[in-house]
Amino acid sequence: MDIKVKMPSTVVSIEVAVGDAVTKGQSLAVVEAMKMKNNTPSPVDGTVKSISASVGERLKPGAVLMVVE
């Protein structure tokens, strides 16, 4: 499942690594949008397959942050 940002955002932190097992609701990353920091929770139980962004990177709406399967 692609984890995407919904609005223009800057990646503040990545809380997981590729290969990590995650549970539904677990924090995957923190992004900042409109001067507010937002937690990005996992929508499913699974494993982090890839991370497409890095800390400090600016993302456009719909950009894939990471993939969890």
Image (cartoon, rainbow, N blue to C red):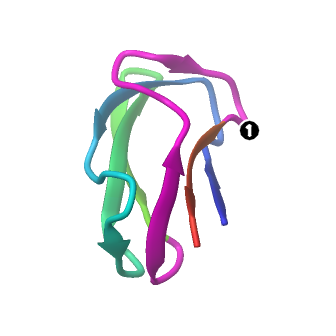
**Left or right of 2, for residue 16:** left
Quadrant in the rendering for residue 25:
bottom left
- Give the answer, above or below, for where 22 lies relative to 54: below
**Left or right of 54, for residue 69:** right
Residue 8 in the magenta stretch? The answer is no
Quarter the C terminus occupies? bottom right
Quarter the N terminus occupies? bottom right
- Give the answer, above or below, for where 24 lies relative to 37: below
Foreground residue among 22 and 19: 19
Name the kind of residue labelled 1 in the image: Gly
- Give the answer, above or below, for where 3 lies relative to 8: below
Foreground residue among 14 and 37: 14
Q: How many marks?
A: 1
Residue receiving disc 1 = 62
Q: Which residues are magenta?
A: 43-63
Where residue 8 appears, as percent x and y from the top left, is 61, 24
Where residue 39 appears, as percent x and y from the top left, is 35, 50
Foreground residue among 29 and 21: 21
Residue 47 in the magenta stretch? The answer is yes
**Left or right of 25, for residue 52:** right
Label 1, secondary structure: give it: loop
For mark 1, does the 10 Å Cα neighbourhood hold few (<14), some (14 to 19), or many (20 or more) residues? few
Q: Residue furthest right?
A: 62
Kindly identify the residue that appears in the image at 34 percent across and 24 percent down. 55
Chief secondary structure of the magenta portion = loop
Kindly identify the residue that appears in the image at 35 percent across and 46 percent down. 29
Q: Residue furthest front?
A: 19
Where residue 21 appears, as percent x and y from the top left, is 34, 75
